[in-house]
Image (spheres, helix red, strand yellow):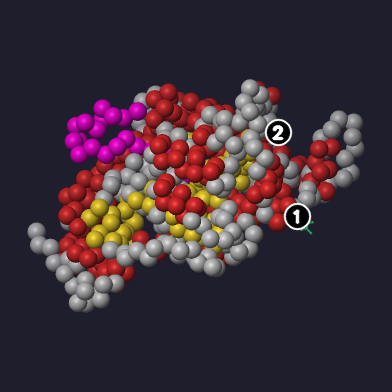
Amino acid sequence: TVDSSLPLSKDLDYHLSAEALRRKESPLKGAFKYYGKPDLVFLGGGLPQPTYFPWNKITTESPAPPFENGIGYKPQDASEMTISEITKHTPSHLEGIDIPLSRSLQYGNTNGQPELIKFLKEHTTMVHPMQYQDWDLIVNTGNTQGWNDLLRNFCDKGDTILTEEYTFASSLEAANAQAITTFPVKMDSFGIIPSQLDAVLTNWIGKKPKLLYTIPTGQNPTGSSLSNERRQEIYKIACKHDILIVEDEPYYFLQMEEYTKDVNARSGKSIHNHEEFVKAMVKSFLSLDTEGRVLRLDSCSKTLAPGTRVGWITAKASFIERFTRIQEVSSQNCSGFSQSIVGGTLNRWGQTGYLDWLIKLRAEYTHKRDVTVDSIYKHFPTELMEFVPPVAGMFFAFHIDATKHPKFESEFKGDVLAVEKAIYERAAEYGSYMIPGSWFKTVGQTEPPQQVAPEKQTHLFFRGTYAATPLDEIIVGIERFGKAIKDEFGIKN
Ligand code: PMP
Ligand code: PLP
């Protein structure tokens, strides 16, 4: 997969943290290059014998591409199934496809099993054509681990990072625990506002932020997605101010067609073939990166299953090597069972079969989104709201102008959060639950503080999801929530 006609990335290793620079290769891991060498009697490693692993075979059954009846369909007979029999020692006709249990359940291959890495690298070149040659990827246990390790590799205590104004609460917690300040960048219904990012960095007081952490597609919690144009602008700003971009992209493949009210026009927009599908994808920051300053976190959590605990980081090779060093002394690697099972299924499906899966997943989420949005327009007081139907992911957010509350000044004393709480409690009482937006707010401040003009907050928002609930229940939940807002704001209908 190395394309030597491409240029090399820039030297950006000066961005590494003191901790990353302290990490040395574990001398015992260095011994692995001798393991399995012919004519070498290996008395070196404390490796248990695969003969003593109590699993000889794992059989898995999955639907088979092209998933004509949708991804939720249960296959009726072998012709509709992908069956993987993964054994301790892979028979020769399955070499390169299956990851033998004798290897996956053994120590070693910190970066992931070669058969899985090969699949993921091919997938990367299909979906995110790279612009420099010295890139690599490492398999890990998902984006939660990826982000935590990344902070350790690039930030020192007291450093500041930039995040979307509202972002995934666990990611903020990971930074907080490492004494890293998270500083917000203003966003609108379409994600980070590039000019705001530039202004924050241009006017920065003190040691500049290390990186921008962003969830560009189907953002958690706002459901927003950055356009190709904004991505290009943000990348340029990152180069200008020499910061790294971390794209945390669990929802990248949950991209959909734009919402249309006209039900009859919907089916005409759906995607059927691989080329159309890849072309319709918004450009990742990784694919825009000419210098090597983007680190991409990918996860199987939303495309296959969260409990696979399979994810991967893609970035320039010298950065990936630092992640190998972290994994060697922490998780070591993603579970061998998981790699054998996920690798076995993906390699049987092939690249095009996996794209078929993603195309059908897209259709499922598009339908769920459509039904949800139809219901929002039907039951919510849209005159009070700002609402942009999501084009990716599993979340939607609606922003409400709290100042329109009849008792905003008299009872709530102009406190937007008090209005948020009142809606939240009334909705729960009516039997519908969504998460208040304020729970995701990035509130970090630096020392000395940045001089940002104080802004009077007037809007609040809630995060809902159409992922976890059957459609008929979603409709009931939205109707109840809509009634709660209307009753709270004294709107009759
Ligand atoms: N601690 C000690 C003392 C060990 O000997 C070993 C394995 N050789 C480990 C930790 C690593 O254990 P694990 O495979 O559970 O991460
Ligand atoms: N990052 C974001 C933005 C998420 O929304 C989630 C899942 O909720 C994660 C990371 C966790 O991903 P993983 O399951 O790969 O650890």
Residue pointed to by mark 1: 22
Does residue 55 sit above or below 257 in this rendering?
Answer: below
Label 2 residue SS: loop
Of the numbered discs 1 and 2, the one sitting upstream in the chain is: 1
Q: In this picture, is 91 found above or below 259?
A: above
Q: Viewer-proximal residue, 183 or 88?
A: 183
Point out the frontmost of discs 1 and 2: 1
Residue 256 part of the magenta segment: yes
Relative to 62, say whether 1 is above or below: above
Mark 1 nearby-residue class (10 Å; few <14, some 14–19, many ≥20): few
Q: Residue at x 32, y 59 (%)?
A: 462
Report x, y in % for residue 356: 43, 29
Res 314 quadrant in image:
top right
Lateral position of residue 251 relative to residue 321, left or right: left
Disc 2 target residue: 89
Amino acid type at image mark 1: Arg
Q: Quadrant of ligand 1?
A: bottom right
Label 1, label 2: how far apart the Cα atoms are? 38 Å
Label 1 residue SS: helix
- Specify the segment rendered in magenta: 249-271
Residue type for callout 2:
His
Q: Residue at x 54, y 47 (%)?
A: 241
Q: Give the camera-side residue of 229 and 323.
A: 229
Q: Quadrant of the C terminus?
A: bottom left
Q: Position of residue 112 (x, y in %)?
A: 66, 40
